[in-house]
Image: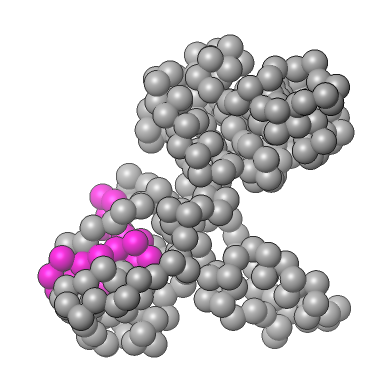
Amino acid sequence: MARPHRNHCQTRGTRLVSRWLHDELKVGDEVEIEAPSGTFCFKGEEAKTLVLVGAGVGITPMMSVTRYLTETNWLGKVYLVLGFRAPRDFIFREELRKLEAGNVNLKVMVTMSQPGTEAWSGPVGRIDAALLSRTVPNIALCRAHVCGPPEMMEATTAALALLGVPAGQIKTEAFGTVKRDPTVKGGESAEVAGFVVFQVSDTRVPVRAGSTILDAADQAGVFIDSACRSGTCASCRVKLLSGNVTMAVQDALTEQDKTNGYILACQAKIQGDATVDA
């Protein structure tokens, strides 16, 4: 079976994975493919109206959702709000025209922040609360998915909250970010925050202050599935059997997950000793 080493690909980013696929993968090789995970998926059952907000290459996951809902004849309303710097950056332009023409429930709104001298008759400026309010009726009742540069996601999330969209109905996809960059590591602390017991693996190891349960698992050779290492995909979701943890990011956990005691190993920092089902 041909497959890139999971952690190597995670920490180096999407470009390395793409390069590996083009340079190394050959006809007849086998690869493992995981189904979409986390809370950014939308199957048509989670809400009656969906708002997809993307900027730049953040349009990519939005296209997957839009295609799926169109192909399955989803009866709900889909509002696709996109932002680009200039018309030359507008990717999937022709496909979107066809999708909108063939789907009466799809409305596409595109704005350009710096169109310059290029021909553009649409809105000019960044995606903000005013644009969202004009585009989406009763937006407070919608579910929203946001993907783009970190600053754009922060501003859009704030705008949606200002317009009354509940926090639980705003889903974000980290399409590369500085704040959640898993490759940035400082010097390891000498202080031990506590011990974690991996129950299934029958392993007990110390966890350094500032380190996560996933960090400790990696060092101990305990396998916990993982992907984004930024708290958004849920691949590293494990059950906390005892103890307490803090998590800076837990976007991928549903309310039911939290009620049932699940945590994200890539984000979980222990407060004293803890036991997990891994």
Could you say where residue 204 lies in the image, as x and y percent from the top left? Answer: 22, 85
> Foreground: 265 or 76?
265
Give left or right: position of 35 versus 160.
Answer: right
Give left or right: position of 50 versus 27.
Answer: left
Read off the magenta span. Answer: 258-278
For the N terminus, give its image quadrant. Answer: bottom right
Could you say where residue 250 lies in the image, as x and y percent from the top left? Answer: 36, 52
Q: Quadrant of residue 247?
A: bottom left
Could you say where residue 145 lies in the image, as x and y percent from the top left? Answer: 54, 36
Q: Quadrant of residue 28?
A: bottom right
The residue shown at (56%, 43%) is 149
Q: Is residue 274 magenta?
A: yes
Q: Is residue 268 magenta?
A: yes
The residue shown at (70%, 17%) is 123
205 lies above or below 245: below
Colouring style: one colour
The residue shown at (77%, 26%) is 116
Residue 267 visible at all: yes
Residue 136 visible at all: no
